Amino acid sequence: MSQYLMSVWHDADYEVDFSGDEFQRIVAQVDAYNEELTAAGAWVFAGGLHPASSATVLRLSDGEVSMTDGPYAETKEQMGGFWVIEAADLDAALEWARKAARACEDPVEVRPFQDG
Amino acid sequence: MADDPDAPGPDGTGDLGRGRDEHGDRDLERDRERDLDRELERDLDRDLDRVFRREAGRCTATLIRILGDIDLAEDAVAEAFAIAAERWQRDRIPPNPGGWITTTARNRAIDRLRRESTRHDRHVAADRLHGLGAGTEIGDEADLDMDDEQDDLDDLDAFVDVVADDQLRLMFLCCHPALSADAQVALTLRLLGGLDTPEIARAFVVPEATMAQRIVRAKRKLRDNHAPYRIPRPAELPDRVATVLAAIFLVFTEGHTATAGDELVRVDLSSEAIRLGRVLVELMPDEPEAVGLLALMLLTDARRPARTDDAGAMVRLADQDRTRWDRDLIAEGHDLVRACLRRNRPGPYQIQAAIAAVHADAADARSTDWVQIVALYDQLYEIAPNPIVGLNRAVAVAELAGPDAGLAALADRATERLESYQPYHAARADLFARAGRPADAVTAYDRAIELTANPAEAAFLRRRRAAVADG
């Protein structure tokens, strides 16, 4: 078994109406998906993140660690959350990611962890 | 293979020794012998080349399964071919060169495993041994412990069989949907086609370093991601087959009309795509789209001798000298299309092959059965409603009902997505010209020329534009 990171991406400036029906619908989809992951023994960890504007970057240079307002990558798309899963191989991981993209309705990036 | 010192070789050509009394003759004889040696060497090189191109993919496919690693497999096969080249200089090429290469590559690889490998590598090899049924993963670590590594490594003998399955696994691996189309094509040509990186780079007119990096990255991605080495499950199969077909067709179209470079046709890529298409049909005889793709490629390739004139300039389908079409390829393509019709599970490649077959039936452009072709395009548009099919349908409609009807059909379909598609502008230009609208035609030709990277094609469009502009 190998571990894969499935990260969820969206526009940096997206706003969520947490009480809205739309959000509730997606939350219900993701909950169901998480249950499926758990039942299959594929679940390792998952979580949603606060917006990228909440990030802080720390960086070592000349022996000193400096701090700047984040996020690190100044891109239009930012990571909004992620899963870590166990899967037999790439094809199994991609199948989980396919379901994840349906559940969260955002693009999902799959990336393998280095073998520990 | 035993060395045979008595084997007839270039030195045993005793008759050439006559007349050695005179110095001049002797020199002549020596030259002649040298020439003969060189010729035999060239013949052997050609034979080895042919064997290599034919067997490399099969051998690599099996070695990947045995070793669980693409690079190790490539190294082992390359080493075995080097040994073969040397050995076969002395002996002759054995009756089953592929089996010889595979066995030699396997033995060398096992020797190396026994000699040098770390415990980890042996575990990987053990996993290959025990994981065959479940499907091997590229770069996976084994969690098996081997009590008797020696015995298990000897069991590798059993792995040289079921070669056909291996080639299919390798096709699906090279054309994994997680890879870009460019990477799929490069990897397919490298691992299944036995082309080396400089050859592939030349074929696609990209710098060698770019192609090398593309291949290295693709292999690393498959390894890091633990891509499985297996035939996809039935549920995944339609999508995965479609990706393999698309990659092979991409190789073919790149060979058929090079997107860049001086020659219109690059024979090597077209031939290689057809070879891969044949392998796929052999491996998946029940996949009608594989048959359809092969038929389409054969029927299209049959026109190759007529697609350029003596000066290398492009000739349109309508203007081609059809006596120059390759009748053997057409006959084979026709047989395959008929087999598809009998099976009656149509798909995009089969329908395109049927269209090519209708063209091949016509003695000249005027006697083409355009009713049939428009009907086939309608069927194709139903299955694959994309603007390019709409464009081709419109061109067929123009042949059937005139240029105005063609232009109307073009406007009717969702063709605005074709704004940066050269053939769209070339087709519009032609229809405008035929509809007596030279100004519109010139504008469309300008746009088409702008979008053309192939010099032969650009020259053709410039000639057409000039003809319209001069009225």
Image (cartoon, rainbow, N blue to C red):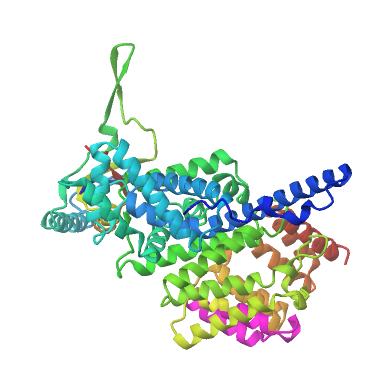
Name the one closer to the observer, B433 or B452.
B452
Provide residue B409's location: percent of width, then percent of height.
62, 76
The answer to whether B358 is drawn above or below residue A80 in the figure is below
Q: Is residue B91 left or right of residue A76?
A: right
Residue at point 40% right, 66% down?
Answer: B164
Asked which quadrant contains residue A5, the reply is top left
Is residue A105 visible to the viewer in this orientation of the structure?
no
Name the one closer to the observer, B142 or B48.
B48
Is residue B149 visible to the viewer in this orientation of the structure?
yes
**Residue B359 on the magenta span:** yes
**Residue B422 on the magenta span:** no
Q: Which residues are magenta?
A: B354-383
Residue at point 70% right, 56% down?
Answer: B447
The answer to whether B320 is drawn above or below residue B224 in the figure is below
Provide residue B94's location: percent of width, then percent of height.
51, 60
Name the one closer to the observer, B250 or B52.
B52
Provide residue B126's location: percent of width, then percent of height.
23, 49
Provide residue B418's location: percent of width, then percent of height.
59, 62
Residue at point 74% right, 53% down?
Answer: B455
Main SS of residues in magenta = helix
Asked which quadrant contains residue B123, the reply is top left
Residue at point 49% right, 44% down?
Answer: B214
Q: Is residue A54 left or right of residue B20?
A: left
